[in-house]
């Protein structure tokens, strides 16, 4: 048998599981891990904040099929800083591995410096969190971590390593070790047959495609099922890109905030909904009375306890999304599919029930920003965004055509997510063009992570919509008849040219080693975005385009999917002669 330190064994496991880089910050209690990494094939990216490391790991996993992002920190506050990223990952079913150092075993109960029971803290936001108490357990704990992350509903795992455990010499032979089998449940054939029966018997069926479809790399099968059965598809926010926006069977998004007028309208006309890999999120559904009224529901999910969590479906099927779609497609091929006018009706709404985006106002309206973004970047661009009024506008006005091309923290929605997630996504897919969409407030949360991308020459374009406001909370405060503690505006004595927009993001970006430009006029947006693309390509650093937008914007939303309030001009167009009706 081969003798090595526990951390050398851990590194051999990481290498064999396909890990090629980690995001981290070294500290005293994790240095044996770093000593082993120094002599391995694994690249290390030195982040500026451990939370940024977790978000970079998320971006890495989300951007590339089969990848698992890894983040590393020392004991104490390093681990507590990682909690937000772990929460974001588990909420969206994203596998990342978080590794922390820990005080020696003998000191764990003695209030040693930076000793905290981090495994207990992270347990609610991970699939598994463990403090490994014996060096000989280390390689097997790492193997189990990867098995757990990949089996069933994906999610994050945390491994905590006391420093004396890290230093132990153990017997471990990597030549006779390999990744553990991963479990993906297959559907019951009888349930699949019944689901197809119900789908084909409906007059106005829809498929709701969730993030699980993308996680399972099942987007092509989803489109095939839709085309075989003539069923329009509603992607969720996490499922956006599973079917191209310009596919005739893409019926648009449904929801209270990130939604399309035509998407909500078609959903309200539907009589059967097949949800796959989705979780019936409340900002998608609104109240159950409106969402469920007059409709039959089928729910397919890899996690058994996810079925019935929000409401009881008429048919529940436990299965991996890819295996379920393979079975559904095979079953549908044996059936006679009825001819329905329903797909043409959904397509007609998609061409006629629109919102205006080509505003020429100064300051610039957010709608115009996305109008120009759609023109400036091609359908192969990976977009990254997080949470806020800018993201809701993104969901209403952007166009997405491929899976893993809209990278968003859906359920948790932590501010400050975008810079690190862009870095992780670009490192996962270096040949992809990555574009972040961010608000001024979120941008400031982890702005120091720009230095990481500058140091490692990680190029991407980031578009800031700056209204010097907490825009979404300001809009929510309308219901309380107040505008309280949401303004970020002030006169910056060093930057009088930006008026009362406060923080000079251009100077801040340049201070971190990146490139920036500011846009006041909507007519300059297109050219500036084209310039940013070229600068990022040639200079190999992030290029930030700050857009000075109107201070007050209200984006369409409402308390129910049939009560969305429009604050700007809508476009109700007539069908062109010969168009589908």
Image: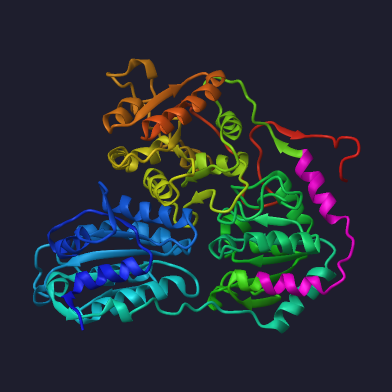
- Magenta region includes residue 367: no
Principal SS element in the magenta part?
helix
Asked if 235 appears above or below 301 in the picture, the reply is above
Q: How many marks?
A: 0
Q: In which quadrant will I find the N terminus?
A: bottom left
Which image quadrant for residue 449?
top left
Q: Colour scheme of this structure image?
A: rainbow
* Boundaries of the magenta span: 325-352
In the rendered image, residue 329, in percent from the top left (x then y), is placed at 73, 69
**Is residue 79 in view?**
yes
Where in the figure is residue 129, as x and y percent of width and height? 31, 73
Which percent across, then down, holds residue 478? 52, 39
Q: Is residue 449 left or right of residue 333?
A: left
- Residue that sits furthest to the top in the current view: 497
Question: Looking at the image, which is closer to me, 240 or 8?
Answer: 8
Q: On the image, which quarter does residue 159 sit in?
A: bottom left
Q: Describe residue 358's horizontal placement relative to residue 466 as left or right.
A: right
Residue 343 highlighted magenta (yes or no): yes
Left or right, 177 with respect to 432, comes to left
Corner quadrant of residue 57: bottom left
In the image, 305: left or right of 563?
left
Tell me, yes or no, if residue 290 can be seen here: no
Residue 19 picture location, percent across and down: 35, 62
């Amino acid at each position: 048998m081969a003798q090595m330190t526990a951390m050398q064994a851990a590194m051999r496991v990481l290498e064999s599981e396909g890990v090629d880089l980690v995001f981290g910050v070294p500290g005293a209690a994790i240095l044996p891990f770093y000593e082993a990494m120094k002599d391995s094939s694994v690249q290390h990216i030195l982040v500026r904040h451990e939370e940024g490391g977790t978000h970079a790991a998320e971006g890495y996993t989300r951007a590339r099929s089969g990848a698992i992002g890894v983040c590393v920190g020392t004991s104490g506050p390093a681990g507590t800083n990682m909690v937000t990223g772990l929460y974001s990952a588990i909420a969206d079913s994203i596998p990342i591995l978080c590794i922390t150092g820990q005080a020696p075993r003998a000191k764990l109960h003695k209030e040693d410096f930076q000793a905290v029971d981090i495994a207990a803290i992270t347990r609610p936001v991970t699939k598994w969190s463990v403090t490994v108490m014996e060096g000989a357990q280390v390689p097997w704990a790492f193997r189990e971590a990867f098995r757990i992350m990949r089996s069933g509903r994906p999610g994050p795992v945390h491994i905590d390593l006391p420093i004396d455990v890290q230093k132990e010499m153990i017997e471990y032979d990597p030549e006779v070790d390999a990744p553990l089998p991963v479990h993906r449940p297959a559907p019951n054939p009888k349930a699949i047959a019944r689901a197809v029966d119900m789908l084909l018997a409906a007059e106005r069926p829809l498929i709701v495609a969730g993030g699980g479809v993308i996680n399972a790399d099942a987007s092509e099968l989803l489109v095939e099922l839709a085309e075989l059965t003539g069923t329009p598809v509603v992607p969720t926010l996490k499922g956006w890109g599973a079917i191209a926006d310009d596919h005739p069977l893409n019926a648009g998004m449904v929801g209270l905030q990130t939604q399309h007028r035509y998407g909500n309208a078609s959903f309200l006309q539907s009589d059967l909904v097949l949800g796959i890999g989705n979780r019936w999120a409340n900002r998608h559904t609104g109240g159950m009375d409106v969402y469920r009224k007059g409709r039959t529901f089928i729910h397919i999910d890899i996690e058994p306890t996810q079925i019935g969590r929000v409401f009881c479906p008429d048919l529940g099927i436990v299965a991996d999304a890819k295996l379920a779609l393979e079975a559904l497609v095979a079953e549908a091929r044996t059936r006679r599919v009825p001819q329905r006018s329903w797909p043409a009706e959904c397509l007609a709404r998609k061409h006629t029930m629109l919102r205006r985006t080509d505003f020429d106002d100064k300051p610039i309206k957010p709608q115009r920003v996305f109008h120009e973004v759609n023109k400036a970047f091609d359908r192969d661009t990976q977009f990254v965004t997080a949470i806020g009024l800018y993201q809701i506008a993104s969901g209403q006005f952007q166009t997405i055509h491929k899976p893993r091309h809209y990278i968003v923290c859906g359920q948790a929605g932590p501010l400050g997510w975008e810079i690190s997630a862009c870095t992780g996504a670009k490192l996962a897919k270096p040949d992809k063009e990555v574009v972040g969409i961010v608000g001024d407030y979120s941008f400031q949360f982890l702005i120091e992570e720009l230095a990481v991308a500058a140091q490692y020459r990680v190029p991407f374009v980031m578009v800031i919509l700056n209204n010097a406001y907490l825009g979404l909370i300001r809009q929510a405060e309308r219901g309380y008849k107040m505008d309280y503690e949401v303004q970020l505006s002030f006169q910056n004595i060093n930057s009088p040219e930006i008026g009362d927009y406060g923080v000079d993001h251009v100077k801040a970006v340049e201070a971190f080693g990146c490139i920036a430009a500011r846009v006041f006029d909507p007519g300059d947006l297109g050219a500036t975005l084209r310039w940013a693309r070229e600068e990022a390509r040639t200079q190999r650093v992030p290029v930030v385009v700050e857009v000075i937008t109107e201070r007050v914007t209200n984006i369409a939303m409402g308390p129910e999917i049939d009560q969305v309030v429009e604050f700007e001009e809508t476009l109700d167009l007539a069908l062109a002669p010969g168009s589908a009706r």
